Amino acid sequence: MDWNLLALSFTAVFISELGDKSQLAAIALGGSSSSPRAVFLGTAAALLLASLLGVIIGEGSAQILPERLVKAVAAIGFALLAVRLLWPEKNAD
Amino acid sequence: MIEPGSIDALTDLLLIFIVSISSPASQPTTEAKPAAALSRAAFWRIFSSTFITIFLAELGDKTQVTTLLMSAQSQAPLVVFLGAGTALVTTSLIGVLLGQWLARRVSPATLDTAAGAMLLGITVWLLWDIAHL
C-alpha cells in the first residue's frame, strides 16, 4: 500500500470538496430532511460511484457523457427540491 | 461524441428521478413527524432523490477530474480511489452533521427557507457551470 499516494489523494479530494455543491447540498438536505441517514447514505453513494466511474472510464468519460445535459438535469433536480422546501404542499400525507 | 445508448440510459434515469422527486415523501420539518417511525418507502425516496441529484451534479466535476488525473499519473488507481472515496464520505458526513447541528439551533420554518435558498443557489451554480463549459 502506497500510503503517500493514499494521503495525497485523500487531501486533494477533501480540500476540493469542502464547500462544494455536494457538501452544501448535504448541509441543506441533512438539516431539513426527515431522514438525515438517507441523505448521508445517498450523498456518499453518489460521490463514490461518480469517482469510481472517474477511475474506471478515465479520459473516456467526457466523450461518453453529454456533460451539459447531465448538469442541466441535476439543476432541475435541485430546483425541484428547493421548490418543495420553500412552498410545501399543504395536504402532503 | 454522444452515443445513442447513453441518451437512452439518461432518459431512464431522468424518469426514475422525476418520479422519485415529485412524490411528496420528504416532509418539510414544519410538519409534525414521528422521527422513529419513518417508513422504508420514505427512506428510499429520500435516498434515491439525494443520490441521483448529487450523482448527476458531480459527474464530470472537479473531484472526478482530480481523481482521473491522479489515477492516470499513478500506477495504483485503487489507492487513489480509496483516498478519494474516504475523503468524499468524510465531507458528506461533515455536511449532514453540520445540517443537523444547524437544525437544532434555528426554527424549522427558518431552516426550510434557508435550505431551499441553498438548493436554489446550487441550481444557479450548476447553470453557471453549464454556461461556462
Image: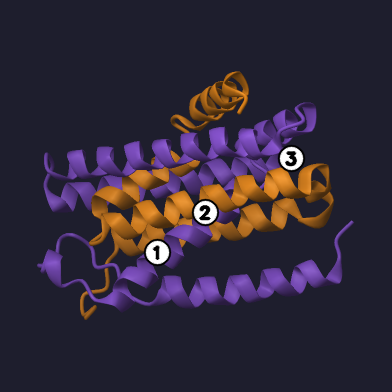
Chain colours: A orange, B purple
Query: Dot 1: few (<14), some (14–19), or many (≥20) neighbours within 10 Å?
Result: many
Chain that bears disc 1: B
Q: Which residue is mark 3?
A: B133
Name, please, the residue furthest toward the top.
Answer: A4
Say above or below: A70 vs B128. below
Element class at badge 3? loop
Query: Dot 2: few (<14), some (14–19), or many (≥20) neighbours within 10 Å?
Result: many
Instruction: Please provide percent x and percent y for residue B67.
Output: 66, 35
Say above or below: A91 vs A46. below
Instruction: Please provide percent x and percent y for residue A82.
Output: 38, 56
Residue type highlighted by circle 3: Leu
Q: Is residue B33 visible?
A: no
- Image quarter (top left, top right, bottom left or bottom right) of the C terminus of chain A: bottom left
The image's mark for residue B129 is none
Query: Dot 3: few (<14), some (14–19), or many (≥20) neighbours within 10 Å?
Result: few
Q: Is residue B118 left or right of residue A33?
A: right
Q: Earlier in the sequence, mark 1 or mark 3?
A: 1
Q: Is residue A14 left or right of residue A58?
A: left
Q: Which residue is mark 2?
A: A46
Q: Residue at x 74, y 40 (%)?
A: B133
Q: Residue at x 36, y 65 (%)?
A: B46
Element class at badge 1? helix
Q: Report which quarter residue A1 is drawn in.
A: top right
Q: Which residue is mark 1?
A: B47
Q: Report which quarter residue A88 is drawn in.
A: bottom left
Element class at badge 2? helix
Residue type highlighted by circle 2: Ala
Residue type highlighted by circle 1: Phe
Q: Is residue B46 left or right of residue B62?
A: left
Nearer to us: label 2 or label 3: 2
Say if mark 1 contacts mark 2, CB within 8 Å: no
Q: Are marks 1 and 3 on the same chain?
A: yes
